[in-house]
């Protein structure tokens, strides 16, 4: 399970996916909300209307915890190699039909 969600989180962050916004939108739940490192709340609609930034990153201390059937909590620390900002990240993934969708994401500067 951990490997699958590590790959999903990387998919969400990788530059080649972020340059094709539809690829990122496809993994977001319709009710997706993000609390960005700035504290701003971002919705799926906001992402549709914005430019996604790309950056190189490292992920540390990755954990996946099953909350209940069809719900998984992800936590990790992300190092943005472009600006050396370290953030604690958390995501909530929900099972929708045959695929996993990111329902919530938060990044907090350490």
Image: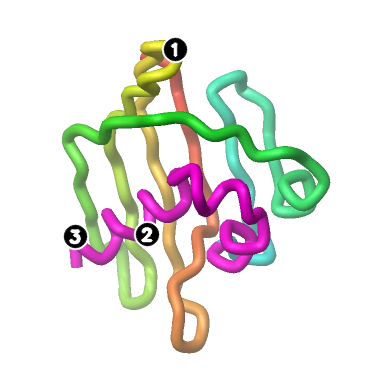
Expressed as whole percent of the image width and height from the top left, the position of residue 64 reads: 23, 54
Query: In the image, which residues are magenta?
Result: 1-27
- Density class for disc 3 (Cα within 10 Å; few <14, some 14-19, many ≥20) is some
Q: Are marks 3 and 2 in contact (CB under 8 Å)?
A: no
Secondary structure at badge 1 equals loop
Cα–Cα span, label 3 and label 2: 10 Å
Mark-to-mark CA distance, 3 and 1: 28 Å
Q: Residue at x 59, y 41 (%)?
A: 34
User: Where does the N terminus fall, quadrant-wise?
Assistant: bottom left
Which is nearer the eye, 54 or 71?
54
- Residue 97 versus residue 35 in the image, above or below: below
Q: Compute the Cα span from label 2 to label 1.
A: 23 Å
Q: Secondary structure at mark 2?
A: helix
* Mark toward the start of the polypeptide (2 vs 1): 2
The residue labelled by disc 2 is 8
Q: Position of residue 88 (x, y in %)?
A: 35, 27
Q: Magenta span has 98? A: no
Give the residue at mark 1. 83
Numbered disc 3: secondary structure: helix
Classified by dominant secondary structure, the portion drawn in magenta counts as helix
Q: Which residue, given by chain and number where applicable, does mark 3 sit on?
A: 2
What residue is drawn where x is 32% and y is 23%? 79
Q: Which numbered mark, 3 or 1, is in the foreground of this view?
A: 1
The numbered mark, 3 or 2, whose residue comes first in the sequence reads 3
Tell me the quadrant of the picture where the C terminus can be found: top left
- Mark 2 or 1: in front is 1
Crowdedness of circle 1 by 10 Å Cα count: few (<14), some, many (20+)?
A: few
* Disc 3 and disc 1 in contact, CB within 8 angstroms: no
Pointer 2 local density, CA inside 10 Å: few below 14, some 14–19, many at least 20: some
Q: Could you tell me residue 72's position as x and y percent?
A: 33, 62
Relative placement, left or right, of 78 versus 34 is: left
């Amino acid at each position: 399970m951990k490997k699958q969600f590590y790959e999903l989180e990387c998919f969400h962050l990788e530059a080649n996916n972020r340059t094709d916004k539809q690829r990122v939108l496809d993994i977001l739940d319709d009710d997706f909300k993000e609390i960005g490192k700035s504290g701003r709340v971002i919705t799926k609609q906001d992402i549709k209307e914005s430019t996604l930034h790309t950056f190189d990153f490292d992920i540390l201390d990755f954990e996946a915890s099953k909350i209940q059937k069809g719900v998984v909590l992800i936590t990790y620390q992300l190092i943005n190699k472009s600006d050396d900002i370290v953030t604690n990240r958390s995501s909530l993934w929900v099972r929708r039909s045959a695929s996993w969708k990111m329902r919530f994401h938060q990044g907090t500067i350490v």
